[in-house]
Image (tube, rainbow, N blue to C red):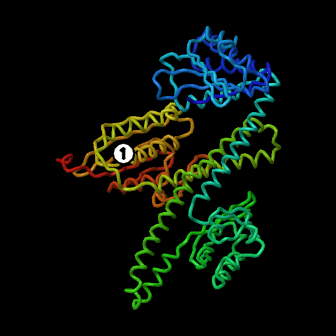
Protein backbone atom coordinates (compact mmCIF):
# COMPACT_ATOMS: atom_id res chain seq x y z
CA UNK A 1 0.00 0.00 0.00
CA UNK A 2 1.04 3.61 -0.61
CA UNK A 3 0.52 6.02 2.30
CA UNK A 4 -1.06 9.26 1.11
CA UNK A 5 -1.37 11.23 4.35
CA UNK A 6 -1.91 10.89 8.11
CA UNK A 7 -3.69 12.85 10.85
CA UNK A 8 -2.88 12.79 14.57
CA UNK A 9 -6.16 12.65 16.54
CA UNK A 10 -5.83 14.89 19.60
CA UNK A 11 -9.15 16.78 19.64
CA UNK A 12 -12.42 17.37 17.81
CA UNK A 13 -10.75 19.66 15.27
CA UNK A 14 -8.57 16.73 14.21
CA UNK A 15 -11.70 14.63 13.73
CA UNK A 16 -13.04 17.25 11.32
CA UNK A 17 -9.69 17.24 9.49
CA UNK A 18 -9.71 13.42 9.28
CA UNK A 19 -13.19 13.50 7.74
CA UNK A 20 -12.09 16.14 5.21
CA UNK A 21 -8.96 14.20 4.19
CA UNK A 22 -10.90 10.94 3.79
CA UNK A 23 -13.53 12.72 1.69
CA UNK A 24 -10.84 14.33 -0.48
CA UNK A 25 -9.00 11.02 -1.08
CA UNK A 26 -12.25 9.33 -2.08
CA UNK A 27 -12.93 12.19 -4.50
CA UNK A 28 -9.47 11.96 -6.09
CA UNK A 29 -9.92 8.17 -6.41
CA UNK A 30 -13.00 8.71 -8.57
CA UNK A 31 -15.73 7.57 -6.16
CA UNK A 32 -19.24 8.98 -6.44
CA UNK A 33 -20.42 11.61 -3.99
CA UNK A 34 -22.45 9.09 -2.03
CA UNK A 35 -19.50 6.69 -1.88
CA UNK A 36 -17.23 9.55 -0.78
CA UNK A 37 -19.63 10.39 2.03
CA UNK A 38 -19.96 6.74 3.08
CA UNK A 39 -16.19 6.21 3.26
CA UNK A 40 -15.52 9.50 5.08
CA UNK A 41 -18.36 8.90 7.57
CA UNK A 42 -17.04 5.42 8.36
CA UNK A 43 -13.58 6.89 8.91
CA UNK A 44 -15.00 9.54 11.24
CA UNK A 45 -16.96 6.98 13.25
CA UNK A 46 -14.04 4.64 13.93
CA UNK A 47 -11.91 7.66 14.85
CA UNK A 48 -14.45 9.44 17.07
CA UNK A 49 -13.81 7.50 20.29
CA UNK A 50 -10.03 7.38 19.84
CA UNK A 51 -9.31 11.11 20.00
CA UNK A 52 -7.24 12.40 22.90
CA UNK A 53 -3.52 12.79 23.61
CA UNK A 54 -3.53 9.89 26.05
CA UNK A 55 -4.64 7.47 23.31
CA UNK A 56 -1.76 8.31 20.89
CA UNK A 57 -4.23 7.90 18.01
CA UNK A 58 -3.25 8.40 14.38
CA UNK A 59 -5.30 7.95 11.20
CA UNK A 60 -3.40 6.95 8.06
CA UNK A 61 -4.90 6.95 4.55
CA UNK A 62 -3.53 4.60 1.87
CA UNK A 63 -4.15 3.54 -1.72
CA UNK A 64 -3.43 0.18 -3.40
CA UNK A 65 -0.19 -0.55 -5.24
CA UNK A 66 -0.05 -0.26 -9.02
CA UNK A 67 0.40 -4.04 -9.44
CA UNK A 68 -2.85 -4.98 -7.66
CA UNK A 69 -5.67 -5.85 -10.06
CA UNK A 70 -8.48 -4.88 -7.68
CA UNK A 71 -7.72 -1.51 -6.12
CA UNK A 72 -8.90 0.02 -2.85
CA UNK A 73 -8.50 3.08 -0.70
CA UNK A 74 -7.72 2.29 2.93
CA UNK A 75 -8.07 4.01 6.29
CA UNK A 76 -6.02 2.60 9.18
CA UNK A 77 -6.61 3.87 12.72
CA UNK A 78 -3.82 3.16 15.23
CA UNK A 79 -4.40 3.90 18.93
CA UNK A 80 -3.47 2.66 22.42
CA UNK A 81 -6.89 2.58 24.13
CA UNK A 82 -6.51 -0.10 26.83
CA UNK A 83 -10.25 -0.63 27.19
CA UNK A 84 -10.99 -0.94 23.45
CA UNK A 85 -13.35 -3.80 22.52
CA UNK A 86 -14.64 -3.75 18.95
CA UNK A 87 -17.95 -5.40 19.80
CA UNK A 88 -18.70 -2.65 22.33
CA UNK A 89 -17.33 0.31 20.40
CA UNK A 90 -20.22 2.36 18.97
CA UNK A 91 -18.02 3.92 16.30
CA UNK A 92 -16.78 0.54 15.03
CA UNK A 93 -20.32 -0.90 15.07
CA UNK A 94 -21.70 2.01 13.06
CA UNK A 95 -18.80 2.00 10.60
CA UNK A 96 -19.34 -1.70 9.95
CA UNK A 97 -22.85 -0.90 8.70
CA UNK A 98 -21.36 1.52 6.16
CA UNK A 99 -18.43 -0.54 4.80
CA UNK A 100 -18.14 -4.32 4.66
CA UNK A 101 -14.33 -4.48 4.56
CA UNK A 102 -13.33 -3.65 8.14
CA UNK A 103 -11.05 -5.54 10.52
CA UNK A 104 -9.35 -5.23 13.92
CA UNK A 105 -5.87 -6.38 14.98
CA UNK A 106 -3.85 -6.00 18.19
CA UNK A 107 -0.08 -5.98 18.66
CA UNK A 108 1.99 -4.97 21.72
CA UNK A 109 -0.64 -2.65 23.13
CA UNK A 110 -1.50 -1.09 19.75
CA UNK A 111 -5.04 -1.32 18.36
CA UNK A 112 -5.24 -1.23 14.58
CA UNK A 113 -8.61 -0.74 12.84
CA UNK A 114 -8.46 -1.08 9.05
CA UNK A 115 -11.30 -0.34 6.65
CA UNK A 116 -11.20 -0.27 2.88
CA UNK A 117 -13.40 0.80 -0.04
CA UNK A 118 -13.16 -0.74 -3.49
CA UNK A 119 -12.41 1.58 -6.40
CA UNK A 120 -13.99 1.42 -9.88
CA UNK A 121 -12.26 -1.00 -12.28
CA UNK A 122 -11.18 1.83 -14.60
CA UNK A 123 -9.26 3.64 -11.85
CA UNK A 124 -5.62 4.15 -12.87
CA UNK A 125 -2.98 4.15 -10.15
CA UNK A 126 0.73 4.67 -10.82
CA UNK A 127 3.64 6.39 -9.09
CA UNK A 128 2.86 9.74 -10.68
CA UNK A 129 -0.78 9.55 -9.65
CA UNK A 130 0.09 8.55 -6.07
CA UNK A 131 2.52 11.47 -5.74
CA UNK A 132 -0.11 13.82 -7.17
CA UNK A 133 -2.66 12.67 -4.59
CA UNK A 134 -0.13 13.14 -1.79
CA UNK A 135 0.53 16.68 -2.97
CA UNK A 136 -3.17 17.50 -3.25
CA UNK A 137 -4.05 16.25 0.23
CA UNK A 138 -1.11 18.01 1.84
CA UNK A 139 -1.39 21.32 -0.02
CA UNK A 140 -5.16 21.87 -0.34
CA UNK A 141 -6.25 25.20 1.21
CA UNK A 142 -6.77 24.88 4.97
CA UNK A 143 -10.34 25.14 6.20
CA UNK A 144 -9.30 26.73 9.50
CA UNK A 145 -6.34 28.42 11.19
CA UNK A 146 -5.97 25.30 13.34
CA UNK A 147 -5.52 23.10 10.26
CA UNK A 148 -2.95 25.50 8.80
CA UNK A 149 -0.92 25.55 12.03
CA UNK A 150 -1.12 21.77 12.38
CA UNK A 151 -0.08 21.28 8.76
CA UNK A 152 2.93 23.58 9.10
CA UNK A 153 4.01 21.87 12.31
CA UNK A 154 3.71 18.50 10.62
CA UNK A 155 5.73 19.67 7.62
CA UNK A 156 8.47 21.09 9.84
CA UNK A 157 8.66 17.86 11.84
CA UNK A 158 8.76 15.75 8.67
CA UNK A 159 11.42 18.00 7.14
CA UNK A 160 13.56 17.74 10.27
CA UNK A 161 13.14 13.96 10.31
CA UNK A 162 14.07 13.68 6.63
CA UNK A 163 17.13 15.86 7.00
CA UNK A 164 18.21 13.87 10.04
CA UNK A 165 17.64 10.63 8.13
CA UNK A 166 19.66 11.93 5.14
CA UNK A 167 22.53 12.85 7.44
CA UNK A 168 22.46 9.43 9.07
CA UNK A 169 22.38 7.72 5.66
CA UNK A 170 25.46 9.69 4.58
CA UNK A 171 27.29 8.81 7.80
CA UNK A 172 26.34 5.12 7.50
CA UNK A 173 27.37 5.07 3.86
CA UNK A 174 30.79 6.64 4.45
CA UNK A 175 31.41 4.40 7.46
CA UNK A 176 30.70 1.30 5.36
CA UNK A 177 33.41 2.13 2.81
CA UNK A 178 36.95 0.76 3.37
CA UNK A 179 38.57 4.11 2.64
CA UNK A 180 39.25 7.23 4.70
CA UNK A 181 36.77 10.07 4.19
CA UNK A 182 37.12 13.31 6.11
CA UNK A 183 36.21 16.99 5.82
CA UNK A 184 38.65 19.80 6.66
CA UNK A 185 38.27 23.56 6.75
CA UNK A 186 40.86 25.80 5.11
CA UNK A 187 42.75 26.03 8.41
CA UNK A 188 43.33 22.28 8.24
CA UNK A 189 40.96 21.37 11.10
CA UNK A 190 38.91 18.19 10.64
CA UNK A 191 35.15 18.74 11.07
CA UNK A 192 33.99 15.23 10.08
CA UNK A 193 35.67 11.84 9.54
CA UNK A 194 34.31 8.38 8.93
CA UNK A 195 35.14 5.48 11.26
CA UNK A 196 37.88 4.14 8.96
CA UNK A 197 40.23 7.00 9.85
CA UNK A 198 40.06 6.16 13.57
CA UNK A 199 40.08 2.37 13.01
CA UNK A 200 43.23 2.60 10.89
CA UNK A 201 45.21 5.32 12.68
CA UNK A 202 43.86 4.94 16.22
CA UNK A 203 43.56 8.74 16.40
CA UNK A 204 40.38 10.68 17.06
CA UNK A 205 39.40 13.90 15.31
CA UNK A 206 40.22 15.85 18.45
CA UNK A 207 43.70 14.29 18.73
CA UNK A 208 44.60 15.07 15.10
CA UNK A 209 43.29 18.64 15.39
CA UNK A 210 45.25 19.12 18.64
CA UNK A 211 48.54 17.36 17.81
CA UNK A 212 48.56 17.41 14.01
CA UNK A 213 49.37 14.54 11.65
CA UNK A 214 52.91 13.91 12.94
CA UNK A 215 51.94 10.75 14.86
CA UNK A 216 49.84 9.43 11.93
CA UNK A 217 51.83 10.22 8.76
CA UNK A 218 55.43 9.33 7.87
CA UNK A 219 57.74 12.28 8.52
CA UNK A 220 59.44 11.95 5.09
CA UNK A 221 56.09 12.39 3.30
CA UNK A 222 54.25 14.80 5.59
CA UNK A 223 56.36 17.85 4.71
CA UNK A 224 55.47 17.72 1.00
CA UNK A 225 51.78 17.16 1.72
CA UNK A 226 51.62 20.10 4.14
CA UNK A 227 53.35 22.26 1.53
CA UNK A 228 50.69 21.24 -1.03
CA UNK A 229 47.97 22.16 1.45
CA UNK A 230 49.44 25.58 2.28
CA UNK A 231 49.77 26.44 -1.41
CA UNK A 232 46.36 25.24 -2.62
CA UNK A 233 43.91 24.89 0.29
CA UNK A 234 42.32 28.28 -0.44
CA UNK A 235 42.24 27.81 -4.23
CA UNK A 236 38.61 27.07 -5.24
CA UNK A 237 39.72 25.53 -8.55
CA UNK A 238 42.47 23.21 -7.34
CA UNK A 239 42.02 19.54 -6.45
CA UNK A 240 44.85 18.44 -4.16
CA UNK A 241 46.18 14.90 -4.70
CA UNK A 242 48.11 13.87 -1.57
CA UNK A 243 50.28 10.72 -1.54
CA UNK A 244 51.92 9.63 1.70
CA UNK A 245 52.49 6.76 4.10
CA UNK A 246 50.10 6.44 7.03
CA UNK A 247 50.71 4.33 10.13
CA UNK A 248 48.47 1.30 10.71
CA UNK A 249 47.88 1.32 14.47
CA UNK A 250 47.16 -2.42 14.44
CA UNK A 251 50.50 -3.49 12.89
CA UNK A 252 52.72 -0.42 13.34
CA UNK A 253 53.41 -0.52 9.56
CA UNK A 254 53.43 2.60 7.41
CA UNK A 255 51.33 1.93 4.30
CA UNK A 256 51.12 4.06 1.16
CA UNK A 257 47.86 5.96 0.59
CA UNK A 258 46.77 8.23 -2.21
CA UNK A 259 43.69 10.36 -2.57
CA UNK A 260 42.00 13.57 -3.63
CA UNK A 261 40.95 16.67 -1.70
CA UNK A 262 38.03 18.39 -3.43
CA UNK A 263 37.06 22.01 -2.62
CA UNK A 264 33.45 22.82 -1.67
CA UNK A 265 32.95 26.52 -2.33
CA UNK A 266 30.77 29.31 -0.97
CA UNK A 267 28.50 31.37 -3.22
CA UNK A 268 31.19 34.05 -3.46
CA UNK A 269 33.70 31.52 -4.85
CA UNK A 270 35.81 31.15 -1.72
CA UNK A 271 36.58 27.70 -0.33
CA UNK A 272 34.22 26.67 2.45
CA UNK A 273 35.83 23.31 3.21
CA UNK A 274 37.44 20.34 1.47
CA UNK A 275 36.24 16.73 1.24
CA UNK A 276 39.20 14.35 1.21
CA UNK A 277 39.20 10.66 0.20
CA UNK A 278 42.23 8.44 0.93
CA UNK A 279 42.66 4.85 -0.29
CA UNK A 280 45.32 2.25 0.52
CA UNK A 281 47.58 1.69 -2.53
CA UNK A 282 50.39 -0.01 -0.64
CA UNK A 283 50.07 -3.18 -2.72
CA UNK A 284 50.53 -1.22 -5.93
CA UNK A 285 53.59 0.57 -4.52
CA UNK A 286 55.13 -2.71 -3.41
CA UNK A 287 54.62 -4.19 -6.88
CA UNK A 288 56.39 -1.21 -8.46
CA UNK A 289 59.32 -1.55 -6.08
CA UNK A 290 59.53 -5.31 -6.59
CA UNK A 291 59.85 -4.94 -10.35
CA UNK A 292 62.75 -2.51 -9.90
CA UNK A 293 64.88 -5.22 -8.33
CA UNK A 294 65.03 -8.29 -10.60
CA UNK A 295 67.43 -10.09 -8.25
CA UNK A 296 64.68 -10.44 -5.64
CA UNK A 297 61.92 -11.29 -8.11
CA UNK A 298 61.91 -15.07 -7.49
CA UNK A 299 61.92 -14.72 -3.71
CA UNK A 300 59.15 -12.14 -3.89
CA UNK A 301 56.90 -14.02 -6.35
CA UNK A 302 54.59 -15.47 -3.72
CA UNK A 303 54.31 -12.05 -2.09
CA UNK A 304 53.63 -10.44 -5.46
CA UNK A 305 50.66 -12.72 -6.07
CA UNK A 306 49.17 -11.63 -2.77
CA UNK A 307 49.93 -8.01 -3.57
CA UNK A 308 48.24 -8.36 -6.97
CA UNK A 309 45.18 -9.72 -5.22
CA UNK A 310 45.22 -6.78 -2.83
CA UNK A 311 45.69 -4.40 -5.74
CA UNK A 312 42.66 -5.83 -7.54
CA UNK A 313 40.70 -5.56 -4.32
CA UNK A 314 41.79 -1.95 -3.97
CA UNK A 315 40.69 -1.19 -7.55
CA UNK A 316 37.33 -2.82 -6.90
CA UNK A 317 36.94 -0.65 -3.83
CA UNK A 318 37.71 2.45 -5.89
CA UNK A 319 35.14 1.41 -8.52
CA UNK A 320 32.62 0.74 -5.78
CA UNK A 321 33.21 4.18 -4.33
CA UNK A 322 32.89 5.85 -7.75
CA UNK A 323 29.57 4.09 -8.28
CA UNK A 324 28.32 4.95 -4.78
CA UNK A 325 29.40 8.58 -5.14
CA UNK A 326 27.37 9.00 -8.36
CA UNK A 327 24.45 6.70 -7.48
CA UNK A 328 23.61 6.17 -3.79
CA UNK A 329 24.68 9.70 -2.80
CA UNK A 330 21.95 11.03 -5.09
CA UNK A 331 19.43 10.25 -2.39
CA UNK A 332 20.49 13.09 -0.03
CA UNK A 333 20.65 15.40 -3.08
CA UNK A 334 17.11 14.42 -4.13
CA UNK A 335 15.85 15.09 -0.62
CA UNK A 336 17.58 18.47 -0.45
CA UNK A 337 15.97 19.40 -3.78
CA UNK A 338 12.54 18.10 -2.73
CA UNK A 339 12.41 19.90 0.58
CA UNK A 340 13.95 23.04 -0.86
CA UNK A 341 11.06 23.14 -3.34
CA UNK A 342 8.60 22.70 -0.45
CA UNK A 343 10.21 25.51 1.52
CA UNK A 344 10.12 27.81 -1.49
CA UNK A 345 6.51 26.98 -2.32
CA UNK A 346 5.26 27.32 1.25
CA UNK A 347 7.43 30.14 2.59
CA UNK A 348 9.03 31.74 -0.47
CA UNK A 349 7.01 34.95 -0.08
CA UNK A 350 8.55 35.50 3.35
CA UNK A 351 12.11 35.70 1.95
CA UNK A 352 13.72 39.07 1.31
CA UNK A 353 14.92 39.94 -2.18
CA UNK A 354 18.52 38.86 -1.58
CA UNK A 355 17.50 35.73 0.34
CA UNK A 356 15.16 34.73 -2.49
CA UNK A 357 18.02 35.05 -4.99
CA UNK A 358 20.30 32.90 -2.80
CA UNK A 359 17.54 30.29 -2.38
CA UNK A 360 16.88 30.16 -6.14
CA UNK A 361 20.62 29.69 -6.73
CA UNK A 362 20.57 26.80 -4.25
CA UNK A 363 17.67 25.11 -6.00
CA UNK A 364 19.18 25.61 -9.48
CA UNK A 365 22.60 24.33 -8.39
CA UNK A 366 21.01 21.26 -6.78
CA UNK A 367 19.11 20.47 -9.97
CA UNK A 368 22.22 20.83 -12.10
CA UNK A 369 24.24 18.63 -9.74
CA UNK A 370 21.54 15.93 -9.76
CA UNK A 371 21.40 15.94 -13.57
CA UNK A 372 25.18 15.86 -13.81
CA UNK A 373 25.48 12.91 -11.39
CA UNK A 374 22.79 10.97 -13.27
CA UNK A 375 24.41 11.62 -16.65
CA UNK A 376 27.88 10.68 -15.40
CA UNK A 377 26.42 7.49 -13.92
CA UNK A 378 24.74 6.68 -17.23
CA UNK A 379 27.95 7.35 -19.16
CA UNK A 380 30.10 5.23 -16.80
CA UNK A 381 27.75 2.21 -16.92
CA UNK A 382 27.60 1.93 -20.73
CA UNK A 383 29.45 -1.31 -21.57
CA UNK A 384 29.58 -3.73 -24.48
CA UNK A 385 27.49 -6.54 -23.02
CA UNK A 386 23.95 -7.90 -23.04
CA UNK A 387 23.63 -8.00 -26.85
CA UNK A 388 20.57 -9.72 -28.32
CA UNK A 389 18.24 -9.36 -31.30
CA UNK A 390 16.44 -6.02 -30.99
CA UNK A 391 13.45 -4.81 -32.99
CA UNK A 392 14.06 -1.05 -33.29
CA UNK A 393 10.34 -0.46 -33.90
CA UNK A 394 9.62 -1.79 -30.39
CA UNK A 395 12.43 0.34 -28.97
CA UNK A 396 10.88 3.49 -30.44
CA UNK A 397 7.47 2.57 -29.04
CA UNK A 398 9.01 2.50 -25.54
CA UNK A 399 10.77 5.83 -26.15
CA UNK A 400 7.55 7.52 -27.30
CA UNK A 401 5.76 6.11 -24.26
CA UNK A 402 8.39 7.48 -21.87
CA UNK A 403 8.31 10.90 -23.56
CA UNK A 404 4.53 10.96 -23.90
CA UNK A 405 4.00 13.89 -21.54
CA UNK A 406 6.50 16.30 -23.13
CA UNK A 407 5.38 15.26 -26.63
CA UNK A 408 1.79 16.17 -25.76
CA UNK A 409 2.83 19.40 -24.05
CA UNK A 410 4.74 20.57 -27.13
CA UNK A 411 2.16 19.01 -29.55
CA UNK A 412 5.13 17.53 -31.37
CA UNK A 413 4.71 15.80 -34.74
CA UNK A 414 6.88 12.65 -34.88
CA UNK A 415 6.91 10.35 -37.91
CA UNK A 416 8.76 7.03 -37.91
CA UNK A 417 9.47 4.82 -40.91
CA UNK A 418 9.90 1.05 -40.84
CA UNK A 419 13.00 0.08 -38.88
CA UNK A 420 15.06 -3.15 -38.96
CA UNK A 421 15.92 -5.78 -36.35
CA UNK A 422 19.61 -5.62 -35.35
CA UNK A 423 21.98 -7.19 -32.84
CA UNK A 424 22.42 -4.85 -29.90
CA UNK A 425 21.79 -3.96 -26.29
CA UNK A 426 18.10 -2.97 -25.99
CA UNK A 427 18.60 -0.76 -22.94
CA UNK A 428 21.46 1.16 -24.55
CA UNK A 429 19.63 1.56 -27.87
CA UNK A 430 16.63 2.94 -26.01
CA UNK A 431 18.92 5.43 -24.25
CA UNK A 432 20.43 6.42 -27.62
CA UNK A 433 17.08 7.03 -29.32
CA UNK A 434 15.58 8.76 -26.28
CA UNK A 435 18.51 11.22 -26.11
CA UNK A 436 18.17 12.13 -29.78
CA UNK A 437 14.38 12.50 -29.70
CA UNK A 438 14.65 14.55 -26.49
CA UNK A 439 17.16 16.85 -28.24
CA UNK A 440 14.72 17.35 -31.09
CA UNK A 441 12.00 18.32 -28.62
CA UNK A 442 14.25 20.51 -26.47
CA UNK A 443 15.91 22.50 -29.27
CA UNK A 444 12.71 23.29 -31.18
CA UNK A 445 12.02 26.83 -32.36
CA UNK A 446 10.16 29.12 -30.00
CA UNK A 447 6.38 29.18 -30.56
CA UNK A 448 6.68 26.45 -33.20
CA UNK A 449 5.44 22.85 -33.14
CA UNK A 450 8.43 20.45 -33.06
CA UNK A 451 8.63 18.24 -36.16
CA UNK A 452 10.84 15.12 -35.96
CA UNK A 453 11.27 12.56 -38.75
CA UNK A 454 12.95 9.20 -38.15
CA UNK A 455 13.82 6.87 -41.03
CA UNK A 456 16.09 3.98 -41.94
CA UNK A 457 18.10 3.37 -45.15
CA UNK A 458 19.31 -0.20 -45.73
CA UNK A 459 22.74 -0.36 -47.38
CA UNK A 460 24.94 -3.29 -48.39
CA UNK A 461 26.09 -4.29 -44.90
CA UNK A 462 24.69 -1.61 -42.66
CA UNK A 463 21.68 0.54 -41.87
CA UNK A 464 21.71 4.35 -41.65
CA UNK A 465 19.21 5.78 -39.17
CA UNK A 466 18.26 9.41 -39.72
CA UNK A 467 16.91 11.72 -36.99
CA UNK A 468 15.78 14.92 -38.67
CA UNK A 469 14.19 17.91 -36.89
CA UNK A 470 13.13 21.44 -37.83
CA UNK A 471 14.54 23.07 -34.70
CA UNK A 472 17.10 25.80 -34.06
CA UNK A 473 19.93 23.85 -35.70
CA UNK A 474 23.63 24.54 -35.09
CA UNK A 475 26.77 25.83 -36.76
CA UNK A 476 28.70 22.90 -38.26
CA UNK A 477 31.99 24.41 -37.10
CA UNK A 478 31.11 22.99 -33.66
CA UNK A 479 30.73 19.38 -34.87
CA UNK A 480 34.22 18.58 -33.61
CA UNK A 481 33.24 19.07 -29.98
CA UNK A 482 29.52 18.20 -30.06
CA UNK A 483 30.06 14.58 -29.03
CA UNK A 484 32.62 15.30 -26.29
CA UNK A 485 31.89 15.22 -22.56
CA UNK A 486 30.55 18.40 -20.92
CA UNK A 487 30.29 20.34 -24.19
CA UNK A 488 27.35 22.72 -24.65
CA UNK A 489 26.53 24.78 -27.73
CA UNK A 490 23.71 26.79 -26.14
CA UNK A 491 23.18 28.94 -23.07
CA UNK A 492 22.18 26.93 -19.96
CA UNK A 493 19.58 29.61 -19.07
CA UNK A 494 17.66 28.88 -22.28
CA UNK A 495 18.27 25.12 -22.68
CA UNK A 496 18.80 22.79 -19.74
CA UNK A 497 21.30 19.93 -19.82
CA UNK A 498 24.74 18.80 -18.71
CA UNK A 499 26.58 18.43 -22.01
CA UNK A 500 26.82 14.64 -21.67
CA UNK A 501 23.85 13.46 -23.75
CA UNK A 502 25.56 13.32 -27.14
CA UNK A 503 28.71 11.85 -25.56
CA UNK A 504 26.54 9.00 -24.27
CA UNK A 505 25.07 8.58 -27.78
CA UNK A 506 28.56 8.37 -29.31
CA UNK A 507 29.72 5.81 -26.75
CA UNK A 508 26.66 3.60 -27.32
CA UNK A 509 27.02 3.76 -31.11
CA UNK A 510 30.73 2.90 -30.97
CA UNK A 511 30.04 -0.06 -28.65
CA UNK A 512 27.69 -1.29 -31.37
CA UNK A 513 30.52 -1.02 -33.94
CA UNK A 514 28.82 1.95 -35.60
CA UNK A 515 29.33 5.67 -36.13
CA UNK A 516 27.38 8.88 -35.54
CA UNK A 517 27.53 12.22 -37.35
CA UNK A 518 25.47 15.39 -37.60
CA UNK A 519 24.44 17.97 -40.17
CA UNK A 520 22.77 21.31 -39.59
CA UNK A 521 22.53 25.04 -40.08
CA UNK A 522 21.39 27.74 -37.64
CA UNK A 523 17.56 28.10 -37.63
CA UNK A 524 17.30 25.35 -40.30
CA UNK A 525 17.11 22.24 -38.14
CA UNK A 526 19.53 19.39 -37.55
CA UNK A 527 19.98 15.82 -38.78
CA UNK A 528 21.79 13.10 -36.84
CA UNK A 529 22.93 10.08 -38.86
CA UNK A 530 23.68 6.78 -37.11
CA UNK A 531 25.30 3.93 -39.02
CA UNK A 532 24.97 0.45 -37.50
CA UNK A 533 26.10 -2.93 -38.92
CA UNK A 534 23.56 -5.50 -40.13
CA UNK A 535 23.68 -9.26 -39.66
CA UNK A 536 24.82 -11.31 -42.69
CA UNK A 537 21.38 -12.88 -43.21
CA UNK A 538 19.79 -9.41 -43.25
CA UNK A 539 22.17 -8.31 -46.00
CA UNK A 540 21.39 -11.41 -48.08
Q: Callout 1: 10 Å neighbours few (<14), some, many (20+)?
A: some
Position of residue 29 measured from the top left corner of the image (x, y, whole percent): 58, 20
Is residue 248 placed above or below 332 in the rendered structure? below
- Number of marks: 1
**Residue at horizontal 68 percent and vertical 43 percent from the top:** 162
Q: Residue furthest left?
A: 540
The answer to whether residue 489 shows anywhere in this view is no
Q: Residue 309 lies in what quarter of the image?
A: bottom left
Position of residue 317 measured from the top left corner of the image (x, y, whole percent): 51, 63
In the image, 232 versus 216, the foreground residue is: 216
Is residue 539 placed above or below 411 in the rendered structure? below
Q: Residue 54 lies in what quarter of the image?
A: top right
Q: Residue furthest bottom?
A: 295
Q: Which residue, given by chain and number where applicable, does mark 1 sit on?
A: 426
Is residue 21 placed above or below 41 in the rendered structure? below
Q: Secondary structure at mark 1?
A: helix
Q: Is residue 26 left or right of residue 124?
A: right
In the image, 394 versus 51, the foreground residue is: 51
**Residue at horizontal 36 percent and vertical 45 percent from the top:** 426
Position of residue 371 measured from the top left corner of the image (x, y, whole percent): 57, 49
Q: Is residue 304 left or right of residue 22?
A: left
The answer to whether residue 526 shows anywhere in this view is yes
Position of residue 38 measured from the top left corner of the image (x, y, whole percent): 63, 11
Instruction: Give the quarter of the figure containing the N terminus.
Output: top right
Amino acid sequence: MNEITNVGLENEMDLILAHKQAMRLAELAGLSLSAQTTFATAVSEVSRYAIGRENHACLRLYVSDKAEKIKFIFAVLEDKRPEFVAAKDDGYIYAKRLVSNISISFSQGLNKTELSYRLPLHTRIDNIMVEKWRTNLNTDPAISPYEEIKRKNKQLIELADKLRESEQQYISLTNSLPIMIFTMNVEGMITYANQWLHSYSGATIEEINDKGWQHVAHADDLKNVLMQWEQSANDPDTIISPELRLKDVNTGEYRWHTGVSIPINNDDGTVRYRNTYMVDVHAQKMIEEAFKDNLQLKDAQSQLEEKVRLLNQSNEQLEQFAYVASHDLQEPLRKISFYSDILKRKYGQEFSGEAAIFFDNLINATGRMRSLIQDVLTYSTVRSDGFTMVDLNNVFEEVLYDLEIVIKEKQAQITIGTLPVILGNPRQLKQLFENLVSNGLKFSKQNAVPVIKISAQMLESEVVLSFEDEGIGFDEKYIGKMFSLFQRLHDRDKYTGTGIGLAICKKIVELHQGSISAQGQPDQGATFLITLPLLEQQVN
